[in-house]
Image: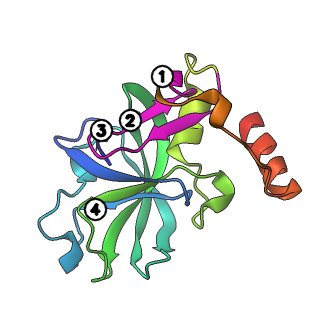
Amino acid sequence: MDKLPLARAPHRILIQFDTGSGDFFVFGKNCGSPACNNHSKYDPDVDKTFSPINGKNFSIKYADGAEISGDSGETTIIMAGLTIEAQEFGLADEVSDNFTHPFEGVMGMGFSKLSVNGQTPPITNLIKQSPIIDKPQFSFLLGRETSELIIGGSNPDRYRADTLTFTVLSIEFENSLKNESEH
């Protein structure tokens, strides 16, 4: 999790990174669901880069049964100090009661094909838009004391290369990897 600034919003939103999905949403200012109580909410009225996507709803159901719905919009976000222009995301107005997590949004980091709302994930847009990212990769270190997200590669001080193995799961998966990095 990390606090992510959305453009010029006066506060930062606590985001859960999710490598198993391709959708991005935050609690919107109109969320009246109990799950949104005591959380920061994104207010598009104070974001100069926000624009609604008229007629496009946002809806997702996660494996744990949590359901989120609302409208779609675009804004500029900042991730690891890098700017992502015109990032599509969902503004959650309704969140099911079983969403009992401490965060105020979920950023899908998976492939675009995993987005049930037809979004391009922020990490994909960042890799496409940033002139300083050489490799279309990201990596996580998940630890008890500290965690880190590396964009554009990995931190070789955090692993032993001779202990890593890679297995292609299927031809379809391999082709989706190629297609994702080409777009």
Q: Nearer the viewer, residue 50 or 159?
A: 159
The circle on residue 146 is 3
Instruction: State the SS at label 3.
Output: loop
| Image quadrant assignment for residue 165 | top right
Residue with the most extreme top position: 132
Inter-mark Cα distance, 2 to 4: 27 Å
Left/right placement of residue 167 relative to residue 171 reads left
The circle on residue 157 is 1
Residues in magenta, as a range: 135-156
Q: Position of residue 132 (x, y in %)?
A: 55, 16
Residue with the most extreme right position: 171
In this view, the mark in front (4 or 1): 1
Instruction: State the SS at label 1.
Output: helix
Q: Position of residue 107 (x, y in %)?
A: 44, 52
Name the kind of residue labelled 2 in the image: Glu
Left/right placement of residue 23 relative to residue 164 reads left
Res. 90 visible in picture? yes
Q: Position of residue 181 (x, y in %)?
A: 73, 36
First in sequence: mark 4 vs mark 3: 4
Name the kind of residue labelled 1 in the image: Asp
Q: Residues within 10 Å of mark 1 (few under 14, many from 20)?
A: few
Q: Residues within 10 Å of mark 3 (few under 14, many from 20)?
A: few
Which corner quadrant holds the C terminus? Answer: top right
Left/right placement of residue 23 relative to residue 111 reads left
Q: Position of residue 125 (x, y in %)?
A: 57, 38
Name the kind of residue labelled 4 in the image: Gly
First in sequence: mark 3 vs mark 1: 3
